[in-house]
Image (spheres, rainbow, N blue to C red):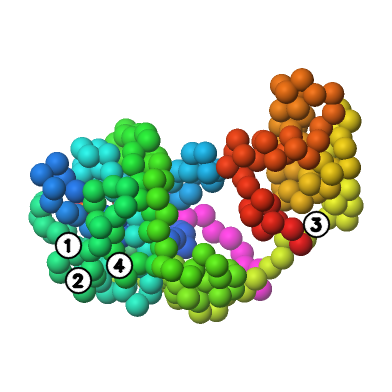
Amino acid sequence: MVKKKEEIKIRPFWYSDIWIFPKMITIITSMDKEGNINAAPYSHIMQYDVMQKNPRMLIGFRQESHSFENICATGEFVVNCPSADYLDDMMETARFWPEGVNELEHTGLTMIPSRKVKPPSIEECPQIAECTVDQIIRLDKSSGIIIANIEAIVMDEGLEQMDRSERIPAMNLPVGLGDQNRRYYYHAHTDNVSMHELAEPPGGQKGGKIKMTMDWDDKAVEALMNIPVAVRKMVSERLEEHAQEKGASSVTAQHLVEMGEEYGIDEELFARFKT
Ligand SMILES: Cc1cc2nc3c(=O)[nH]c(=O)nc-3n(C[C@H](O)[C@H](O)[C@H](O)COP(=O)(O)O)c2cc1C
């Protein structure tokens, strides 16, 4: 039922006390310059640049946190996503341990070597991103934002091959629902997941707003129709630019393959969009 609305006063910690942001739960591992390991949960995290050329994440920290200080000092860290079975261990790493304490030693979590960076990864996490710093933004009187390059994505064997409907329950990632009074943290478990199809609008397959200013061969048009509708217009414009840069008078499917290679999109990725 639709309810009457009321304006809420914006108080400190509005984001967790009042507003509900369902969030990803991660444990970030980092090291200080002396090599001491640190671990703490971070949920203010978002994918930032999804292309393979420069995959990045954006993460928000308290500037005086050990994690932020370590990352600024060494430029490296790991984003570990624990399954819901390890929420108690995750909470243990959130406690305000003194500097230099490895929070993981107070948990049942296991450290394993990372592949591309020095801080360790956590074995119990099915999904891990090894990161290096791209940009540090110190917001005035507020948090620090780190934009990170993803150097490696490491997952439990077999997860990549699964259909999303299988992968979601297999990973069992919790959803963070914020806290009450910085003490009581709420989490949802992903055991009741629904799926909704993003359908093409009527006529969407015909290309919608796409304006072709050059000649396109049939294979190029067919390939374009396999691109998700949300980016089809952008891809068609870039593709014409690409063909012009190559000195071509018409757009061919080969131009799409070349452009795909430049952006890190291969046949396998295209296949994911085919219905
Ligand atoms: C589920 C959860 C999510 C959290 N997310 C963040 C976050 O995104 N940003 C942040 O600054 N602190 C966050 N915290 C608080 C830090 O984990 C906490 O301040 C921790 O003690 C910092 O440890 P560190 O100084 O070793 O980095 C979160 C805590 C929990 C329990």
> Which residue in the structure is indicated by mark 1?
103
User: What's the amino acid at mark 3?
Assistant: Glu
> Which residue in the structure is indicated by mark 3?
200
Q: Quadrant of residue 108?
A: bottom left
Q: Are marks 2 and 4 in contact (CB under 8 Å)?
A: no
Q: Quadrant of residue 122?
A: bottom left
User: What's the amino acid at mark 4?
Assistant: Glu
Can you give x and y, in whole percent of width and height, for residue 3 in the image?
Answer: 62, 68
Provide the secondary structure element on which disc 2 rests. loop
Q: Are marks 2 and 1 in contact (CB under 8 Å)?
A: yes
Marks 2/4: CA distance? 13 Å
User: Which quarter of the frame holds ligand 1?
Assistant: bottom left
Q: Please tell me whether residue 139 is drawn above or below residue 17 in the rendered image.
A: above
Can you give x and y, in whole percent of width and height, for residue 217 in the image?
Answer: 88, 37
Marks 1/3: CA distance? 48 Å
What range is drawn magenta here? 1-10
Instruction: Determine the residue positioned at 68% across, 68% down.
Output: 196
Can you give x and y, in whole percent of width and height, for residue 216 in the image?
Answer: 86, 35
> Which residue in the structure is indicated by mark 2?
107
> Which residue in the structure is indicated by mark 4?
123
Q: Nearer the viewer, residue 196 or 170?
A: 170
Q: Give the overall secondary structure of the magenta segment.
A: loop
User: What's the amino acid at mark 2?
Assistant: Thr
